[in-house]
Image: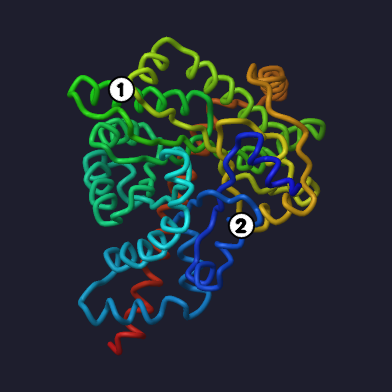
Amino acid sequence: MKPTQALHELGQSLWLDNITRELLDSGTLRRYIDEFSVTGLTSNPTIFDEAIGSGSAYDAGIAEKVKAGTASEALFVELALEDLRRAADLFRPTFDATHGLDGWVSMEVSPLLSADTRGTIEAASQIHSQAARDNLFVKIPGTPEGVTAIEESIFNGIPVNVTLLFSREQYSAVAHAYMRGIERRIDARRSPKVACVASLFVSRWDKAIADKAPIELRNRLGIAIGQCTYKAYRDLLASPRWTTLAAAGAMPQRLLWASTSSKDPAASDTLYVEALAAPDTIDTMPEKTLKAFADHGTLRGAMDEGGGDGEATLAEFAKAGIDVDALALQLQQEGAASFVKSWKQLLGRIDEKSRALGGT
């Protein structure tokens, strides 16, 4: 049995952290579904920027849209949704078989709206409508401004992938926003079945403190954060508040591990995948990490629902002078700024190609 299949049978969903037109046209995504137990995928501005800029696969589509008078952000959204609809259709059998728990793809709202709650809510609604796929998540950052947008979008029936979470506390804030949205739907006599995932970024922790932490603590902070957050996730699912919502028909907001590729060349390329094996969660992996785990990954069992040695490890980092709370905020802010930079670069590339292919 392949390690990827064993992980799937443990109860964790394996999603691909990538999408390109070539991946679809070549049948590679279909092969990942069949051979590596992949049941969904995620995307972000950086992924699309690299995909559009790396060749000519999107040129015909860009030229056609320019001719129709579509430009800039609107052109990109149409281009991205063409790919994501195709991927969503490949995952639709999984979506149906799991009653909407799995089989999802994701599309980002503009990162330029990260401080604009009302604009984010409106953009999420527009993307959901334009995508015309039941199994497409709209990605909203779990920033302080995003928390309100998440609650309101859930209330509006929009499936949400909450992104840019870096700590247990940030996760808890969006988990409660999700529950408030569902509770409001129940009070309004609407269906409580609105899907949501909460994406915790892992490896960026260790990259951020690589030259600050003692050697014995290297590549341990991201996993410790994951362990503590997983305990909070399990505690929430066992809480009276959640069990009441579940009894009314609500779906759990699943915890998703993001940024699971190893950033340290000296570390195992399957480090985070192996450490974060956990039922009822999702691991979204870049292609390189997915292939590495399929080839030589080892499944050592499921994470401890009680958080394992996560708290003890965080205490060691505190003794070493690492302020985890401050770093969580810094990482979220840097992540949001990075997405803005990628978004602007992406739109610049779209505009450049539009001028070249449109003959202007």
Which element is circle 2 on? helix
- Distance Cα–Cα, label 1 vs label 2: 38 Å
Which residue is label 2 attached to? 34
Q: Nearer the viewer, residue 46 or 78?
A: 78
Locate residue 232: give its quadrant: top right
Q: Would you call the spot at circle 2 few (<14 residues within 10 Å), some (14-19), or many (20 or more)?
A: few
Q: Nearer the viewer, residue 210 or 284?
A: 284
Q: Position of residue 256 (x, y in %)?
A: 53, 37
Callout in the foreground (1, 2)? 2
Say if 136 sits above or below 315 in the image.
below
Say if 53 sits above or below 43 in the image.
below
Q: Nearer the viewer, residue 7 or 16?
A: 7
Would residue 261 be found to the left or right of residue 61 on screen? right
Q: Residue at x 25, y 31 (%)?
A: 155
Q: Position of residue 177 (x, y in %)?
A: 34, 26
Q: Residue at x 35, y 77 (%)?
A: 61
Q: Which mark is residue 271?
A: none
Of the 4 image quadrants, the one containing the C terminus is bottom left
Residue type pointed to by label 2: Asp
Residue type pointed to by label 1: Arg
Which residue is outermost to the top?
A: 240
Q: Position of residue 33 (x, y in %)?
A: 58, 56
Q: Residue at x 29, y 68 (%)?
A: 75
Q: Earlier in the sequence, mark 1 or mark 2?
A: 2
